[in-house]
Image (cartoon, rainbow, N blue to C red):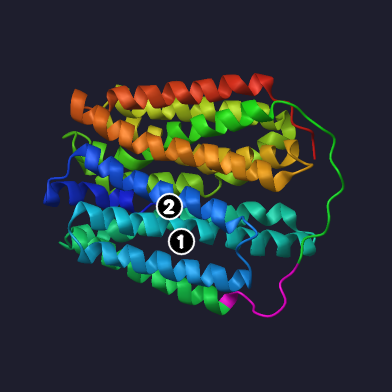
Amino acid sequence: MGVGRFVYTPILPAMVAALDLSKAEAGLIASANFIGYLLGALLAASPVIRGSKRGWLVGGLAVSALTTGAMGYVGDLPAFLALRFAGGIASAFVLVFASTLVLDRLAAAGRSSLSSVHFAGVGIGIAVSAAIVSASTTAGTDWRGLWIDSAVAALAALFIAAVLIPGGAEPQARAEPARPGGRGLGALILAYGLFGFGYIITATFIVDLVRGTPNLAPLEPYIWIAVGLAAVPSVAFWNRAAVRIGLPVAFAIACIVEAFGVALSVLWDAPAAVLIGAVLLGGTMMGITALGLLGARRLGARDPRRWLALATAAFGLGQIVGPSFAGYAHDVTGSFLLPSLVAAAALVLAAALQGFVRVPVG
């Protein structure tokens, strides 16, 4: 996930410089990936997909790696859109089937508390792929080589995963008791969509923003690594916070923290400010993702699959709109200030909507 879905962010500045892409075109490429991700998540969760979860996971990892590498062998916008769309579908299959295998196995073993270790993998992948891109750039590799190097890392991870994931019978999670009802499911899903819009603008363009600001340019090799490292413990941290203060309150606080980070990255061009903004983004984006899905699952206890799908759709729509909006807004205004402040406002609204949400404890 960290490579197939997010490596576009650190590679983007090199592509923009070499191909003279407009920010609108760059945002469109990102949106194509998220359209694929949305459709892939809904397809992977549907009863149409049958057979071995392990097989679908390994296949998704393979397609993700291959489409990542293929980006280095094409050079026109339609090909970029097609490959990122296919890569988005593959990334969704990876998330759905990896999570199903891991979480079912943890539930069967009575170790569900270790789920945060699983989700930390996204942050690790972001940090590792950012380090690879940084090292390759320093060695003089062009944008094509950056995609190919990233694909090699993804293929290595595919091999390791294929060896370590057992074959044979797949564990089934134990049936859970019925949960008490809550309220505010619609507000939670709307907030989840606003979060998807609010985080993805900075998550797509922060490295490009850093490269384009002279006094921030020295941060380029490190800024996306900071996002990934901050994401590693975020799910465990925010899950623990939800247990202590309640899921809606934790969701709201995380959104406010992220809104501050998003705004800080464009309101103050000091290196320390942008680095703090990156850490706040990484330290919340995976945590809020987990809290939103957990809340939808609990509130939709009678039909969790349906509501998880709706939450995923809302989140996906936010991600699709965000990069394209930001790219066009940048081309019109000449900066990411306006789209980033709109994103921060969306996150604040997502936090406010938690006042209408009551999630049962459990």
Front one among 331 and 49:
49
Give the main secondary structure, helix, strand or loop, of the magenta stretch: loop
Residue toward you, 66 or 155:
66
Residue 209 image offset from top left, x and y in percent: 25, 36
The number of discs equals 2
Label 2, residues with CA under 10 Å away: few <14, some 14-19, many ≥20: many
The answer for how far apart the CA atoms under marks 2 and 1 are is 8 Å
Q: Is residue 305 visible?
A: yes
Task: Residue 219: give x, y in percent of width and height.
Answer: 26, 42
Highlighted magenta segment, given as a residue range: 164-171
Residue drawn at x 40%, y 40% as measured from the top left: 320
Please tell me how crowded label 1 is: few (under 14), some (14-19), or many (20+) other residues with Cα within 10 Å. Answer: many
Q: Amino acid at mark 2?
A: Gly
Q: Is residue 280 visible?
A: no
**Looking at the image, residue 244 lies above or below residue 356:** below
Q: Quarter-wise, where is residue 112 in the image?
A: bottom right
The stretch drawn in magenta includes residue 104? no
The residue type indicated by label 1 comes to: Ala
Residue beneath the point at 30% across and 39% down:
205
Foreground pick, 283 / 37: 37
Which residue is the site of mark 2?
A: 36
Give yes or no for contact between labels 2 and 1 (Cβ–Cβ under 8 Å): yes
Determine the residue positioned at 46% across, 35% down.
318
Mark 2 / mark 1, whichever is N-terminal = 2
